[in-house]
Amino acid sequence: MTVYFIGAGPGDPELITVKGQRLIRSCPVILYAGSLVPAAVLEGHSAELLVNTAELHLEEIIALIKAAHGRGQDIARVHSGDPSLYGAIGEQIRLLRRLQIPFAIVPGVTATAACAALLESELTLPGISQTLILTRYASKTSMPAGEQLPDLARHGATMAIHLGIGHLPKIVAELLPHYGADCPVAVIHRASWPDQDWVSGTLADIQPKVQAKGFRRTALILVGRVLAAEDFADSNLYRAGHEHLYRPADKA
């Protein structure tokens, strides 16, 4: 018996991995985060027990897992995006280890990846940014020392900010000294869902644009020069004359 923590992807049911889909369709027990996982992701399942855990607390979820473990049943524990990012699987894993219940993690497509695809952007461009910082805005959950937004913004790297749309004015104020008012920014609402929407701008004008859209939750903020860069160097990967293992130099 195994508990499979499955990343369902950002919303589009076709963005779940083949492995994740196979497990959802074969596991006799499915526990899914119903507030973020669309019903379409679960289509084709033949589970004996299907539970939306949005209304349950941790101890109730573990109790369901223990009961299924006692019956020798595999469990598909379905989370949105990639479960390793803000998936709250760490606390579940800690308890499963104590209970000696086997588990495995099946990665998923992140919201950040879905947003970049929607914006038709590469988040790491030569000479512009080679670093992507994924973070969240500190509100109910405090941030460790050195991980406050201004600390991260000093790097000037491309940044994806989760769970911050309700604090956009504060976020803009903290980013401005490090990125500049003309720095491109995009706010994407429910990327890859049928009702996805987004708005692009700069740190100087993004707030009224977001207000006009009415985004209040389930949105990701992307910040960085890569979002509007046109003047950047080609990578070495496909540059003629650049030798590597799979493309030796032309000896002629």
Image (tube, rainbow, N blue to C red):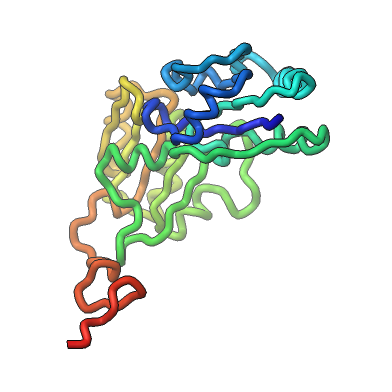
Label total for image: 0
Q: Is residue 114 left or right of residue 34?
A: left
Q: Is residue 223 visible?
A: yes
Q: Nearer the viewer, residue 189 or 107?
A: 107
Q: Residue at x 58, y 15 (%)?
A: 47
Q: Quadrant of residue 26?
A: top right
Identify the image quadrant of residue 73: top right
Q: Residue at x 44, y 38 (%)?
A: 109
Q: Residue at x 39, y 33 (%)?
A: 15
Instruction: Please provide percent x and percent y for residue 153.
Output: 45, 54
Asked whether 128 or 47 is in front, the reply is 47
Quadrant of the drawing holding the N terminus: top right
Where residue 234 appears, as percent x and y from the top left, is: 23, 66
Image quadrant in which the C terminus is located: bottom left
Q: Is 120 rendered above or below residue 28?
A: below
Give coordinates of residue 5: x percent, y percent: 60, 33
Q: Residue at x 27, y 50 (%)?
A: 182
Question: Residue 151 versus residue 250: which sits nearer the camera?
Answer: 250
* Figure check: 71 above or below 111: above
Would residue 59 be visible to someone looking at this image? no
